[in-house]
Amino acid sequence: MKNKAAYCTGLEKMEIDDAPMPVCGDEDVLIEVAYCGVCGSDAHWYANGEAGFEDVYPYILGHEFTGVVIETGSEVSNLKIGDRVVVEPGKTCGKCKWCKEGRYNLCPDIRFLSAPREQGAMQKYVAHPASLCYKLPENVSLKTGALIEPFAVGLHAVETAEVTPGKTVAILGCGCIGLCVLMASKLYHAAKVIMLDVFEEKLQTALAFGADAVIHSKNEDAAARVMELTDGMGADIVFEAAGTPVTTAMTEKLVMRGGVITLIGCTHGETPFEFYHIIEKEVAIKPIFRYRNNYQTAIKALEGGRVELDRLITGEYTLEQAKEAFDTALYGKQDNIKVMVKIKDE
Ligand SMILES: [Zn+2]
Ligand SMILES: [Zn+2]
């Protein structure tokens, strides 16, 4: 067996090269990777890198992946050779306060694949703790399974914000994560989902995915339109899934008195936020970071045909075409949602 990887070798540079064969530890499984999606964070890293990690190259990106178990460590009992699995990419310490409380996404020692300095999954073989690998049901393909990771973000967001039947939801940003929040909100029986973006193509996509109303937040008065659509009350829950200071600042204008704002996007930089509106409206701000304990729900929802995640895939490339895949994720048209890299046939 020979390993091969797509190495990011600098800003917007990608090279396919031989890679060391991962070692399967006692509690690990060795996975032959099948599909790996390009995450917004991967594309961001590919384009911009990160301060403090200028020396990390050659670096392997990718963390949204599935594959087939080809070797099991001596301590592994939950999986066997031939199992098709989806992988939770964050390796936690299991010992800290947050791990013990089950809030393991907050583990300060988490090693998350494709977050520096942990190498990612755009390679033919990955060794990973078996406890973080979940068997896929027979009716879920390896390709669709690779979307469980971003969908887990949507589930963690709606569970944190407590979307329940009857609630009205507003989502800022109609990219992959915004659409995952839309699908998760529908799964939790939100009464109405309003989606906002500044690109017409993205609003059309949101409608095709079942949004009840869409707002062009540049051409329209977003706050006035949300009030119109909610009998003058505002949305029970506002999700920020665009990751910009402008959309983050907008959340307080769309939310109802006593409502909830959940921040998902990785907003950096100063954000002008009118906190007095949060205080007088007693709004709860509940940010989320990645996800925790959501994979089983995502897998069951897929198995039961309750979500159609495969609709998110708008492009497919081979490992050799990894550069093209990343360029498409970065510069592709606005109707582009999720770019998938096929590393091995099913
Ligand atoms: Zn991701
Ligand atoms: Zn920990």
Image (cartoon, rainbow, N blue to C red):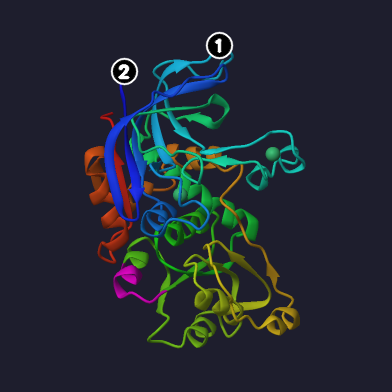
Q: Residue at x 45, y 45 (%)?
A: 56
Secondary structure mostly seen in magenta is helix
The extreme front residue here reads 55
* Residue occupied by mark 2: 1
| Callout 1 secondary element | loop
Q: In the figure, residue 139 lies in which quadrant?
A: top left
Residue 324, position as x, y percentages in the image = 23, 50
| Callout 2 secondary element | loop
Q: Residue at x 46, y 47 (%)?
A: 55
Q: State which quarter of the image contains the N terminus.
A: top left
Q: Which amino acid type is marked by label 2?
A: Met
Closest to the observer: 250 or 223? 250
**Residue behind label 2 places its C-beta within 8 angstroms of ligand 1:** no
Q: Bin the neighbour count of mark 1 within 10 Å (Cα to Cα): few under 14, some 14-19, many 20 and up.
A: few
Residue 243, position as x, y percentages in the image = 50, 67
**Residue 198 falls inside the magenta stretch:** yes
The extreme right residue here reads 97
Residue 141 seen by the camera: no
Q: Earlier in the sequence, mark 1 or mark 2?
A: 2
The span picked out in magenta is 197-204
Q: Residue at x 53, y 62 (%)?
A: 266
* Residue occupied by mark 1: 74
Q: Is residue 142 above or below residue 253?
A: above
Closest to the observer: 166 or 222? 222
Say how many tags the image has: 2
Q: Is residue 156 above or below residue 334?
A: above
Q: Is residue 23 above or below residue 184?
A: above
Q: Is residue 302 above or below residue 224?
A: above
